Amino acid sequence: MRGGGDFKYKTSASAVDVTSTAGWATLSTGVEGTLTGDVPFAEATTDRVTYGLAITRDEQTVPIAGGATAQSKIEGSATCW
């Protein structure tokens, strides 16, 4: 997200193909990743992800940071967030 980008999301009952964001909802534009390497998300462990981003509108910037642990995981399957 270097230089600002769109923050998008999609819900699904199954694994989501992330090679295209066509059909995804845009939550915000002008979003910067604040983690190492200017990325918004990073894997902390095999079942935990950290996030850090800043959303800027006009002259106001709102920082958002934290982490999430997988709710469930079946061995050999995709992690559910």
Image: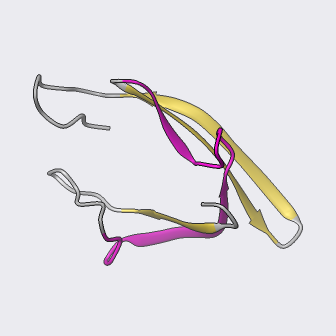
Q: Nearer the viewer, residue 19 or 50?
A: 19
Counting from the top left corner in percent of width and height, residue 64 is at: 67, 44
Counting from the top left corner in percent of width and height, residue 18 is at: 30, 60
Counting from the top left corner in percent of width and height, residue 29 is at: 62, 71
Q: Which residues are magenta?
A: 20-45
Instruction: Note whether 30 is above or below 18 in the view shown.
Output: below
Question: Residue 25 in magenta?
Answer: yes
Tell me the residue at 29%/28% (across/down): 71
Q: Nearer the viewer, residue 72 or 76?
A: 76
Tell me the residue at 32%/28% (across/down): 70
Counting from the top left corner in percent of width and height, residue 7 is at: 53, 63
Instruction: Note whether 11 is above or below 70 in the view shown.
Output: below
- Spot the residue most to the bottom: 22
Figure quadrant of the C terminus: top left
Q: Nearer the viewer, residue 45 or 10?
A: 45
In the shown orientation, is residue 62 left or right of residue 65?
right
